[in-house]
Image (cartoon, rainbow, N blue to C red):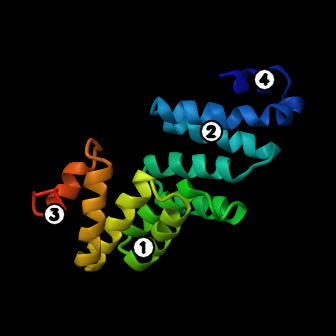
Amino acid sequence: TAYEAAIAANPRLAHTHYGMAARSGRVALRHEQRERAIVILKESMQYGSNAETHYLLGTAYYLSGKPDLAASSFDQALADKPDHVGALTNRGYIHIDRKHFDDATKLFARARELAPKDENALYGLALSLQNAGNTQEAAELWRVFVKDFPESRWAATARRYLGGAGEP
């Protein structure tokens, strides 16, 4: 990547190319090169970091099966920027994985407040409520999900929770 080339060409000036790290890390993630993304993002943090860098690193860790490191990165992203919707939702999914449904619900609800049309926030909120046993409240959100995101990769799951009907 351009970022890696800049560091190789002149490591002392890598901090001036710091913004490229997030882009390079994002590209590596998009191409499912998770370990490469981790290396790029961690190297870039030698020169500074921000909420987005921590969010991307957390995503790479999570997708690499390293939930503790992912949680720490998402927490740092949220410390830097408490309204980072991606960090809120991804941290919420870690809570779901750990069966901490109340904590997950709080994060997803906050993400929905910030981004009411965010697919991940809506799905996560419905899922956390469903798993916590709040099936009535979850059903309302599953209906919204199916209506707003009928072609989503998660629409079939939402319909299953609705008993297959998928209609309000």
Identify the residue under disc 2: 39
Disc 4 secondary structure class: helix
- Mark 2 or 3: in front is 3
The dot on residue 6 is 4
Quadrant where the C terminus sits is bottom left
User: Camera-side residue: 83 or 40?
Assistant: 83
Could you tell me if residue 68 is visible in this image?
no
Choose top left, top right, bottom left or bottom right for residue 94: bottom left
Q: Earlier in the sequence, mark 2 or mark 3?
A: 2
Q: Residues within 10 Å of mark 2 (few under 14, many from 20)?
A: few
Q: Residues within 10 Å of mark 3 (few under 14, many from 20)?
A: some
Name the residue type under label 2.
Val
Q: Please report the residue visible at 69 percent of the width from the left and 35 percent of the height from the top.
A: 21
Identify the residue under disc 1: 105
Disc 1 secondary structure class: helix
Identify the residue under disc 3: 162
The span from disc 4 to disc 2 (Cα, nearest Å) is: 15 Å
Residue 85 in the image: x percent, y percent? 55, 57
Name the residue type under label 1.
Thr
